Image: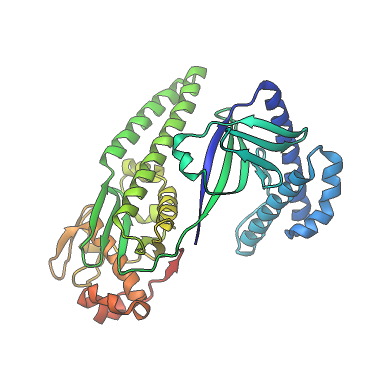
Amino acid sequence: MKIKRTIKLVIKPSEREKHILFKTFEEYKFAYNFVAEIGWKSSIHNSVKLHNLTYIVVREKTSLPSQLVISARNVASESLKSAFSRKKKGFTVSCPYSNNPAIRYDKRSYSVWFDREEISIATIEGRLKLKIKIPEYFRQYLSWDIRSASLKYNKRLKKFFFNIVVEKEIEEIPENDTVVGIDLGLSKLATLSTADGKINKFFDGGHIRAVSERYFAIRKKLQSKGTPSAKRHLRKLSQKEKRFRTAINHKIAKEIVNLIPAGGTIVLEELKGIRERIKVSKKERRWIHSWNFAQLKQFIEYKAKSKGIKVVYINPKYTSQRCGKCGYVSKSNRKDQSHFKCSYCGYTVNADLNASRNIAINYLVSQKERLGHRVASLPVWAVVNQPNVRGLAVSSHS
């Protein structure tokens, strides 16, 4: 099994080097948008056909080396394929266009020497050698196999970023009996539990909410001023808040994966509609809309893969309304965001913990024929009373 990581580097070119890079970005942008426009008008996304239609023209109109012409074409081809696929599904789409595309590099268009902290990349003026500084955290990946890379200019930060994808082969880890359900929510950012309740863990959102509210108050104050200085502070604040949220999601994802033995299974609720499902006040709605649950899910996925932990997604229908003890389903069971009390058997438990157990139970029931003996950990209602769980679709993303 192969796992991938991205080494994210900041490069600091000289004024002359900046000029070359900016000109390369401009011509790469032209190539990408030109190919996308031709493909859109012709309803073509096949890279070979697009090559025949655009390669000569792009070479004549730009100073891009052939590797970057091909790179821009491939990226445009992927964008067109995605757009046509969405159009086929009934979504409203338009011709792909980018005002600041990242330049994709492959082994033929860039080289890297980690030992002397230097890269060489293709530009409109030939190969350009640039010094890099490798953060201590990324040094653990320097022995991995080097794959593609991308160069991106962040207009807001006015910085160039060079991201190198590295890859490593790891041993396949056999699947074990540990299945953990995770509920994402409001009072607790994440709550995890097994069907039998042997593993329980809360990731409280109290401190995080307090910090987010402080950022919101500062942002509101700066927005009301509207001065150039206030706008500069807003940009800095935005990046600081983004780093804070990313760091928290990394921390939670790491702790979750460390709690689960290698070869286990993590069951998450499908994220589509999560913000609509969580009914809250206007103030709390701002908080729930601001948190990046998709990023947290992504971090859990890639950290789990390195331990051979499978991540699957299940329809969350009824998980917050069903009693994890007797299986009775009712809206009245969930008293509020934190409290659950079954109207039938009187079972009382934290609402998020009950939901996370139900997520694990739903997956186990849906897989009972394949998992066999693992249903022994399920409550009696989940094994006998099949109608309670029938129709809950499961999708796997391993």
In this orientation, which residue lies closer to the viewer: 276 or 7?
Answer: 7
> Residue at left 71%, top 52%?
74
Query: Residue 378: in sight, yes or no?
Result: no
> Residue at left 43%, top 23%?
222
Query: Residue 86: in sight, yes or no?
Result: yes
Give the number of marks: 0
Residue 40: quarter of image: bottom right
Q: Position of residue 368 (x, y in %)?
A: 33, 78
254 on left or right of 88? left
Q: In which quadrant of the rendered image does the C terminus lie?
A: bottom left
The vertical placement of 343 against 204, above or below, is below
The furthest residue to the left = 346
Residue 218: quarter of image: top left
Picture colour scheme: rainbow
Q: Position of residue 8 (x, y in %)?
A: 53, 39
In this orientation, which residue lies closer to the viewer: 167 or 347?
Answer: 167
The furthest residue to the front = 115
370 on left or right of 134? left
> Residue at left 37%, top 31%?
215
The vertical placement of 319 against 279, above or below, is below
Q: Position of residue 370 (x, y in %)?
A: 37, 78
The vertical placement of 59 against 217, above or below, is below
Q: Position of residue 361 (x, y in %)?
A: 29, 69
In this orientation, which residue lies closer to the viewer: 256 or 319?
Answer: 256
> Residue at left 45%, top 62%?
171
In this orientation, which residue lies closer to the viewer: 185 or 321?
Answer: 185
